[in-house]
Amino acid sequence: MDQHTARTPPTPGPKGGDTAAGVFRPPPPPAHPVAVLVRRLRAVHRRRPRLTGLGTGLLTTGVTVLGGAVDSLLFGGPGVLFGLVFVTVSVAGAVYVRPYDLVAAPVAAPIAFATGIALTSDGGSGLVGHLLGVFTGLALLTGWLYTGTLLAALIVGVRALRRPSRRRRSRRCSTAPRGRSPR
């Protein structure tokens, strides 16, 4: 019956620091406002937005083509700005793709790069001139292609390794105690 009675906190005794049960401890000093804010932000568990495989491909391709168009308008052809936009969007696609579609990010990166080069290359007139511009752009900007694709593959690889396994273990491999199975 004693367990249902309310307990009161100890009160300070006549000396200011003594209590009936022991020594009175003052409350801890107030925490710094920034520390309180950080603790509250960590406590809020928000789901990050996730892209499907198709969404990742469309995002990567669209932003890469847009970056190539801006680079072509400002500097006369795809160059450093195009490469930086491509690497950035490849990393973003690898970070925000949903776990089920992880393989889509490294596959979408080279497709987006080739599409961006094909649509924004500064080739000459006619089909042959455009094809020469595409092949020249692919040859000169290969470092950006490899960098964006490699970073996307590394991020996806790390995310895949950190993902918990969904397979169930057999009873033979389980940690349950061995014994006779129930009939």
Image: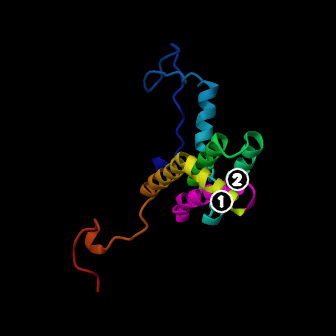
Residue shown at the point (29%, 82%) measured from the top left:
182
In magenta, the rendered stretch is 97-126
> Does the CB distance between marks 1 and 2 fall below 8 Å?
yes
Give the amino acid at mark 1. Leu
Residue shown at the point (22%, 79%) measured from the top left:
180
How far apart, in angstroms, are the residues tagged by discs 1 and 2? Answer: 7 Å
Residue shown at the point (61%, 55%) measured from the top left:
113
The image position of residue 22, as x and y in percent, is: 43, 24
Which residue corresponds to mark 2? 123
Against 179, residue 11 (above or below) is: above
Helix, strand or loop: magenta stretch: helix
Quadrant where the C terminus sits is: bottom left
Decide if residue 160 is on the left or right side of residue 129. Answer: left
Residue 27 has which mark?
none
Which residue corresponds to mark 1? 131
Is residue 60 among the parts visible in the rendering? no
Q: Nearer the viewer, residue 72 or 99?
A: 72
Decide if residue 73 is on the left or right side of residue 144. Answer: right
The image position of residue 179, as x and y in percent, is: 22, 75
> Could you say which quadrant of the image residue 42 lies in?
top right
Residue lying furthest left in this view? Answer: 179
Is residue 76 among the parts visible in the rendering? yes
Give the amino acid at mark 2. Gly
Q: Secondary structure at mark 2?
A: loop
Q: Nearer the viewer, residue 164 or 90?
A: 90
Packing grade of label 1 (10 A; few <14, some 14-19, many >=20) is some
Q: Is residue 88 magenta?
A: no
**Nearer the N terminus, badge 1 or badge 2?**
2
Decide if residue 101 is on the left or right side of residue 63. Answer: left
